Amino acid sequence: MIDSKEATKALSDIDDIVRRVRQSQIYNLASLIMIWWGVLVFAGNIATYRWQWYGGYVWPIVNIAGVAGTVLISAFMHMRTHVRAVDGRVIAAFLSFFAFGYLCSQVLGHFGPRQLAAFWPIYFMLFYMLAGLWFGRAFIVIGLGITVLTLIGYFFIPGGAFLLWMAAVNGGGLILSGLWMRRS
Amino acid sequence: MAELDDIIHQPLRLRIMAALNALPLGTGLEFARLKKLTGATDGNLGAHIETLAKAGYVGVEKAFVGKKPQTTVTATAAGRRAFARHVATLQEIIAASGGEPP
């Protein structure tokens, strides 16, 4: 028979593994969602660069496809792993977040296309960084990395090339981060 | 006080069972993922999974995903019960000494 110190150590090992399993499941789900959004954001930036006058149509399509894909991925993963990513509270949080962003960028401030192209990624990366406080450092690293790269592009890359930069750092960044998360 | 389960008590086997038990019933973990979570080496993990499988605590399923072999390990109902008993015994040991579980 073991003593209470060894028993405490064993229970704390169990807690640690359970925490790592849960985090791994969250990373697995989040990585798929991230890759999906990365592909859409990459395509959205390239499309806006190529057909600048249609930017107003491109981004609503990207957002609707993004949310629909997120719900489908979440439902699929829920069936496989019983981890639920999207429920009423998550949808309410997402809508509140989106509404606040719209209020800041379109009502209180009147951001131009360049400001919008920088604002939304940075704003969503803030969401990632906040999520990272609960769900793991990977979210913080990804959020911070994409925010810094977006700001570099915003201040140093002139004209339409900024959209190509955003396709690479935001779209490509999300895809690479999703792939990295699947390995971690 | 109930006896500790000798098969589960070994540290790596305890981590394997804890990881599998954290999943919903019938859901398993791929060998590579289990290796990463437990920090074990291939050979060590394989040997301990075999011990757990012989005891009927885990099920091992081998399949091919594309051309790659994939091994999935799942806790059986008996394994989950044994793990729950083992955890209860650990908590009893701590309680008997006047401490509180972590």
Image (spheres, helix red, strand yellow):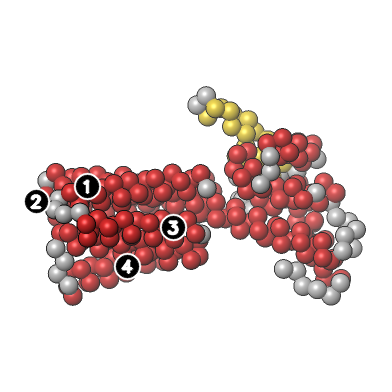
**Numbered circle sitting on residue A128:** none
**Mark closest to the chain's N terminus, 1 or 2:** 2
Q: Nearer the viewer, mark 4 or mark 3?
A: 3
Q: Amino acid at mark 2?
A: Trp
Q: What chain letter is assigned to the residue under label 3?
A: A
Q: Quadrant of residue A9?
A: bottom right
Mark 2 lies on residue? A53
Mark 3 lies on residue? A141
Q: Tell me if A20 is positioned left or right of A135 in this view.
A: right
Q: Are marks 4 and 2 in contact (CB under 8 Å)?
A: no
Q: Are marks 4 and 3 in contact (CB under 8 Å)?
A: no
Q: Amino acid at mark 4?
A: Phe
Q: Amino acid at mark 1?
A: Leu
Residue A72 appears in view? no
Mark 1 lies on residue? A164
Q: Assess disc 4: are there few (<14), some (14-19) or many (≥20) residues with their C-alpha within 10 Å of its C-alpha.
A: some
- Report, in whole angstroms, how far the alpha carbon at label 2 lies from the one at label 3: 34 Å
Name of the residue lying farthest toward the top: B67
Q: Nearer the viewer, mark 2 or mark 3?
A: 3
Image quadrant in which the C terminus of chain B is located: bottom right
